[in-house]
């Protein structure tokens, strides 16, 4: 093991830790101060003799101007921004990118110090580096599931409001005030867009883009078609809510019946890693040959590839589209 190499990685890790710490402190301390300042500037400009008003939704990828310009041209950052928006994350993409780089450094150095194996170190760095994005993805899926559970009740409320003689936007306002995040927050943002002058169709399409929910897309398409062709909107929304409940019941039955297969998949995929880790601590010389000998590396690569294929097959068996 090269001490200079380890010292270099430790130095880079320390520098990244300091940078991330200052960046996180800046974000948590200032909060939305920069956004508020920009809105005040826009209001002051609009209050003057300027006849044109810019209501375009400008994305802020980082609080640091230089990094923001870099992220504007970087590939994949807009997709990450959409994921953060769906997860309702309070931090910009730059925070997670730097945090991921820091975790990669920590994972690599830690694995080198404890195992001395570069192959394990690279795997450890990859796992540590991808963990923030997996957390965001999990948070996004949890939020969308909660939105899907709230949506049928909200649609019933909108349908009752329409039957009582209220407008469609008034029904959405009732739903936004009655339900908590995520449905109340997203409906309120849609109403804000409508109040700013965006058409109802465009605001509903934006709502469908922000929330990756199939049931919501049915609602958006139905409302847009009804506004173009006519029809009883209250009855349409009631039927959509009933359809959503039936789909939720069917999904619950499928999830219950496929629970055994999913548990078997987790055990079968996790057992090899547990055995390797146990042998690494109990008998290191016995398991190190698997990573130091060329034949052992080939066997590890083939095993990982076969495990990946098996995971895809099991996922295909237990995952049903409803």
Image (cartoon, rainbow, N blue to C red):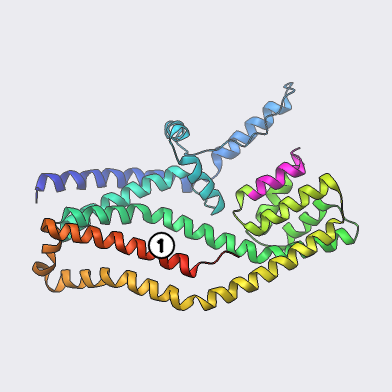
Residue that badge 1 annotates: 312
Whether residue 137 is visible, yes or no, is yes
In this view, the residue in front, 93 or 281, is: 281
- Give residue 322's position: percent from left, percent from top: 61, 65
Secondary structure at badge 1 equals helix
Is residue 52 rendered to the left or right of residue 229?
left
> Residue at the right extreme?
165
Per the image, is 200 magenta? yes
Magenta region, mostly helix, strand or loop?
helix
Residue placed at 70% from the left, 51% from the top?
Answer: 188
In this view, the residue in front, 170 or 163, is: 163
Whether residue 30 is visible, yes or no, is no
Residue placed at 67% from the left, 53% from the top?
Answer: 217
Residue placed at 45% from the left, 41% from the top?
Answer: 76
Q: Quadrant of residue 196?
A: top right
- Give residue 20's position: percent from left, percent from top: 36, 46
- Give residue 140's position: percent from left, percent from top: 53, 57
- Give residue 98's position: percent from left, percent from top: 37, 45
Residue placed at 15% from the left, 56% from the top?
Answer: 117
Residue range of the region highlighted in magenta in the rendering: 194-208
Is residue 173 rendered to the left or right of residue 296?
right
Q: Residues within 10 Å of mark 1 (few under 14, many from 20)?
A: few
Per the image, is 281 magenta? no
């Amino acid at each position: 093991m090269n001490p200079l190499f380890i010292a270099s990685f430790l130095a880079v890790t320390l520098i990244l830790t300091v940078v991330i710490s200052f960046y996180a402190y800046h974000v948590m301390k200032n909060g939305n101060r920069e956004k508020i300042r920009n809105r005040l500037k826009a209001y002051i400009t609009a209050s003057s003799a300027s006849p044109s008003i810019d209501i375009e939704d400008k994305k802020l990828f980082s609080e640091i101007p230089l990094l923001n310009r870099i992220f504007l041209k970087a590939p994949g950052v807009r997709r990450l921004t959409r994921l953060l928006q769906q997860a309702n994350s309070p931090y910009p993409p730059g925070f997670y990118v730097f945090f991921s780089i820091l975790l990669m450094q920590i994972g690599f150095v830690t694995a080198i110090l404890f195992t001395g194996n570069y192959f394990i170190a690279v795997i450890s760095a990859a796992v540590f580096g991808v963990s923030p994005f997996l957390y965001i993805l999990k948070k996004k899926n949890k939020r969308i599931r909660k939105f899907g559970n709230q949506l049928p009740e909200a649609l019933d409320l909108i349908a009752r409001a329409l039957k009582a003689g209220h407008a469609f936007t008034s029904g959405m306002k009732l739903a936004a005030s009655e339900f908590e995040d995520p449905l109340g927050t997203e409906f309120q943002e849609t109403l804000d867009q409508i109040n700013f002058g965006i058409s109802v169709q465009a605001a509903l399409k934006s709502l469908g883009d922000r929330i990756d929910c199939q049931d919501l897309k049915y609602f958006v398409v139905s409302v847009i078609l009804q506004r173009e062709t006519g029809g009883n909107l209250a009855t349409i929304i009631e039927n959509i809510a009933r359809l959503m409940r039936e789909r939720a019941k069917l999904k619950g039955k499928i999830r219950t019946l496929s629970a055994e297969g999913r548990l078997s998949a987790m055990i079968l995929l996790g057992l090899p890693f547990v055995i390797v880790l146990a042998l690494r601590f109990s008998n290191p010389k016995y398991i190190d040959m698997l990573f130091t000998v060329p034949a052992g590396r080939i066997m590890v690569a083939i095993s990982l590839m076969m495990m990946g294929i098996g995971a895809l097959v099991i996922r295909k068996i237990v995952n049903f589209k409803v």
